[in-house]
Amino acid sequence: MKLGAVIITMGNRPDELRALLDSVTAQHGDRIEVVVVGNGAPVPDVPAGVRTVELPENLGIPGGRNVGIEAFGPCGTDVDALLFLDDDGLLPNRDTAELCRQAFEADPRLGIITFRIADPDTGVTQRRHVPRLRAADPMRSSRVTTFLGGANAVRTKVIDEVGPLPEDFFYAHEETDLAWRALDAGWMIDYRADMVLNHPTTAPSRHAVYHRMVARNRVWLARRNLPAPLVPLYTGVWLLLTLVRRPSPALAAWFGGFREGWTAPCGTRRPMKWRTVWRLTRLGRPPVI
């Protein structure tokens, strides 16, 4: 299989970006073609052979990644699969690309692989980086219902069939939107503990827009993808969870985003089939939480 890689950057991590690019170059097997997208910022110096695209404005995470996808032809189909990697991540093992190729070749319905994210100093995987409800054991690989945005591989046939990431989301939940559409089309998603991306332990709330966009996009996710009876159930469960967790002083921002999710256009609505709801349930994550 022919692999490509998409990395978006704000230009503020030149050393980390260079280390990531070196780790991609070091992968066993055929060369991986890489595109680095400067998301509203100049791209730092990169090694020869790495393609770059500089955008005049920040399009957000899904918008920037979509530009990187199109650099590999329509829907990325000049290659068989694309790695999406955070610019401050690192592939510590040299066989990750080969493991991806083997996994995709062994299972024609496998559409997305999500890697295990580990802190480079402690080796710890944060619970939020295990994309399932039963997240106590990050070393257990399994079928899952979503994936991690900056540590994954996506078969380009998936993008060609179900479309790209939702650009209006800008930040948060864009991966789950693509995952649900892929699952509805019959593709599968695997969490692989043996495919590792090193990434410093961080809190998602470090982003100023985190609470507003998490709430807004959660509503958009439901409005775009869920059968009508599940939309109020899904959003209601998350409302109750938020109230229980009380993310003060961010609660006002969260409710502002929640309200925006209902009042702002969410894009094209394509509710998933009820059999997909059952598939999600059997995989351990019914689409009500």
Image (spheres, helix red, strand yellow):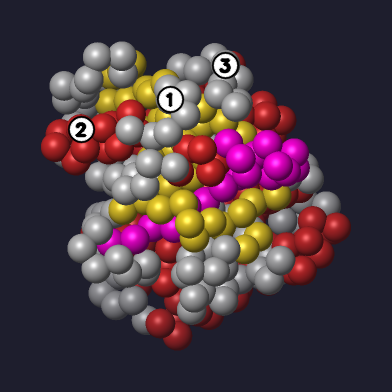
* Label 2 environment density (alpha carbons within 10 Å; few <14, some 14–19, many ≥20): some
In this rendering, the answer to whether 122 lies above or below 4 is below
Of labels 3 and 2, earlier in sequence is 2
**Label 3: which residue?**
78
In this rendering, the answer to whether 22 lies above or below 266 is above
* Label at residue 180: none
Of labels 1 and 2, earlier in sequence is 2
Residue type marked 3 = Asp
In the image, residue 108 lies at what x, y percent? 75, 39
**Label 2: which residue?**
18
Q: Could you tell me which residue is drawn at 21 percent across and 37 percent down? A: 19
Name the image quarter holding the N terminus: top right
252 inside magenta stretch: no
Q: Is residue 192 left or right of residue 124?
A: right
Secondary structure under badge 3?
loop
Q: How many marks?
A: 3
Residue type marked 1 = Ile
**Marks 1/3: CA distance?**
12 Å
* Label 1 environment density (alpha carbons within 10 Å; few <14, some 14–19, many ≥20): many
Secondary structure under badge 1?
loop
118 inside magenta stretch: yes
Q: Could you tell me which residue is drawn at 56 percent across and 47 percent down? A: 113
Observer-nearest of 20 and 9: 20
Write down the region rendered in magenta: 101-119
Q: Could you tell me which residue is drawn at 20 percent across and 63 percent down? A: 121
Observer-nearest of 48 and 76: 48
Secondary structure under badge 2?
helix
**Marks 3/2: CA distance?**
25 Å
**Label 1: which residue?**
32
In the image, residue 205 lies at what x, y percent? 29, 63
